[in-house]
Image (cartoon, rainbow, N blue to C red):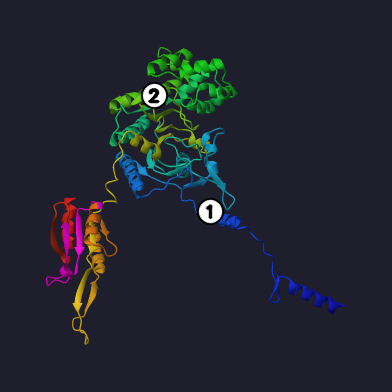
Amino acid sequence: LCRFLTMALLVLLRKSSSFQNGRILKPQRIIPLAQSSLSTTNKNQKNKIDLNPPRGTRDFFPAEMRLRTWLFQQWHEVSKSYGFEEYDSPILESEALFIRKAGEEVTQQLYNFEDKGNRRVALRPEMTPSLARMVMSRKTSLAFPIKWYSIPQCFRYERMSLGRKREHYQWNMDIWGIEGSEAEIELLCAIISFFKKVGFNSKDIAIKVNSRSLLASLLSSIGVPTDQFSAICILVDKLEKVPLESLKSEFHNLGVNDDMLSTMVDVLKIGNLQTLKIQLQKTNPLFLNFEDKSENKSDKVQQLEEEFKQLETLFAYATKAGIADWLILDTSMVRGLSYYTGIVFEAFDRKGKFRSICGGGRYDNLLSTMGSDTPVRACGFGFGDVVVMELLASYNKLPNFEDAGSQECDIVVSALDVMRQTRRVDSENDNAKEVDSENMHGEAIQVAEMLREQGLSVDLVLGPKKMKWILKHALKKKSPFLALIGPDEWNSSQGHSIVIKDLKIESQIVVPIKSIPQWAESQSHEK
């Protein structure tokens, strides 16, 4: 019976299209032609790489890189002219370094994740906490005051707008170990030096200055909760771009009622030192009342007097430095970061298009928030590359690198590969000819290296090119000289020589290779 059933099954399988050559085939699904083409298209689309950088970030092709290098050079030169030293830190930091106050925007804007070692890390959104970590790690060995600068790359996942992307480079200058406003005026002078360097004046740009500690006293005097001051400052910082009505509910949640808001709006309109002084005296009768002895004044009043004197001294220093016309007092400007403690400042363009070009201030307590037993006085600023490039473009002050093509060099070196026709002996055809090519690229490499050793920047033409192309290339590079290595000069009876063309005066000379160092040295002196 089993043999019969087996034979019957084999007969049925042989009749089936699913059995071929003794193998059972898997059933095939029939796909309509249109559906098959669509599946292939979708597959190709999935395999296609997105050629755009991640949203909010940038590629820097050579043209953009020349602009970036130029901008960074301006920052380097200004920083060094003020005696600052350059530093850097990892772009990847511990997440805890940037999580300070709940509600602070930077906390919600972190690019953060857990690494393979189960550590919470983040791409730095700003440089100041990293700098504070570095200072704290060597606080006992550093010789204060210190003046450091950096140009780090920073990342923030924020809503993009004019002057803001999710990735940017930021020029930072910071001073640690100075208590008085000598530090702030040094930083303000550096910022203004940069603005002047790139073609701006005080009619184009102004810098708002304020004191958060004085503002805290004024707001406290009208009943604003002192423990909510940092959170209130974040809302005040938004008032310039968001209507008050849209923020009222958030102020109410922080304990600021409508009457307080009305008075606060008047306080935020104070625009000169005299009005600020009068307002402080109204709320603190003993403030700047020198007829009363200091022991009659509370610590709070004495602290207020010190803060006001620092602000007053800053404007006096600005007059001495010749930058008073760049500065204005604005009590509504507070900066959004909670670690600021005293004087703060922020640059804007007077046309009103760029409300925050750069900014900074004093952050005396930052080390204390990181666990330090003793605070170190500090202040600094940050200046982003995105906003300054848009500012320069808006005022038509960007340098024009389009005509320059590639980066300039001192000399272009090229081989001249000559095609020669030579007669060869042929028993069947005495007139037969063959073509030889004399490749001079090896000799061109030798000359290029000799010139580089003499300190010249050399662009070596790679591969055989026609003379017309070589000349156009040298002009595109804005090279003043073109060195040509050809067989005639190289194999001359006078010894190995090259032709050097002076493209400025359209002349040329023949230079023996043994004289190349002397020729290069003469060009270095002329530079």
Q: Crowding at label 1, few (<14), some or many (≥20) Cα neighbours within 10 Å?
A: few
Region of the chain picked out in magenta, as a range: 476-501
Task: Kindly identify which residue carries mark 2.
Answer: 311
The residue carrying pointer 2 sits among few (fewer than 14), some (14 to 19) or many (20 or more) residues within 10 Å by Cα, namely many
The reply, left or right, for residue 393 in relation to residue 304 is left
Q: Residue furthest right?
A: 1
Residue 69 in the image, given as x and y percentages of width and height: 33, 46
**Residue 338 vs residue 508, the one in the foreground:** 508
> Label 2, label 1: how many angstroms apart (C-alpha)?
61 Å
Point 19% across, 70% down: residue? 487
Identify the residue shown where x is 28% and y is 42%.
400
Residue occupying image coordinates x 81% and y 78%? 7
For disc 1, the marked residue is: 45
Question: Helix, strand or loop at disc 1?
Answer: helix
Left or right of 98 in this view: 514: left
Comparing 417 with 139, the one in front is 417
- The front one of 2 and 11 is 11
288 is higher (above) or lower (below) than 444 = above
At which x and y percent is residue 213?
47, 25
Which secondary structure lies at badge 2? helix
Whichever of callouts 2 and 1 sits on the residue coming sooner in the sequence is 1
Q: Is residue 498 magenta?
A: yes
Image quadrant where one finds the N terminus: bottom right
On the image, the x and y values in percent for residue 204 come to: 32, 28
